[in-house]
Amino acid sequence: MARPEAGLLARVGATPLVEIPLVREVSPAARLFAKLEGEARKAIHEDGADVIVLGSTTMHQSHAYLREQLPVPVINPGLVAYKLCELFLDLGLSHSKTAYPSPEIVQDENLWGQT
């Protein structure tokens, strides 16, 4: 959901929930894709959605299917995050060293619990 202080809440058409447990139940892809498509079409026709943003990187397999089925763009958040990271690296950008300074003592050996 959009953060209220960002001023985007008024632009969010819908945030439907597709009730298929993705971890505990091994659902056939067709069943999940059909539910996602149904909710997306409902958002398009009832709420005026002009783009669909998948709500989880666990839905990445549905992206190609939904992109072919729906009349609006479908955004895959995992791919967007990957491409943004790639862009930042290509441009030589990183986080703010003022807001997030490097540690005084680098302890990379402890990063993965190795001491």
Image (cartoon, grey):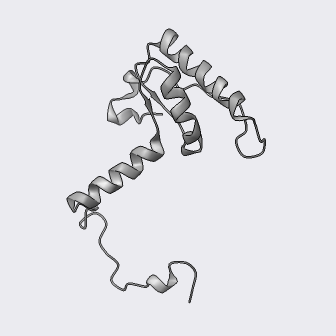
- Residue 71 location, quadrant: top left
Task: Examine the rendered structure and indicate whether residue 63 appears above or below residue 69.
Answer: below
Q: Is residue 90 above or below residue 29?
A: below
Q: Quadrant of residue 12?
A: top left
| Residue 73 in the figure: left or right of residue 60 | left
Residue at the extreme top of the image, as rendered = 46
**Identity of the residue drawn at 69% across and 34% down:** 29
Lateral position of residue 40 relative to residue 104, left or right: right
As drawn, the residue found furthest toward the bottom would be 115
Q: Position of residue 78 (x, y in %)?
A: 47, 46
Q: Position of residue 96 (x, y in %)?
A: 25, 62
Quadrant location of the C terminus in the rendered image: bottom right
Q: Considering depth in this image, is 16 or 88 the residue closer to the camera?
A: 88
The residue positioned 35% from the left and 78% from the top of the image is 103
Residue at screen point 69% across, 29% down: 30
59 above or below 45? below
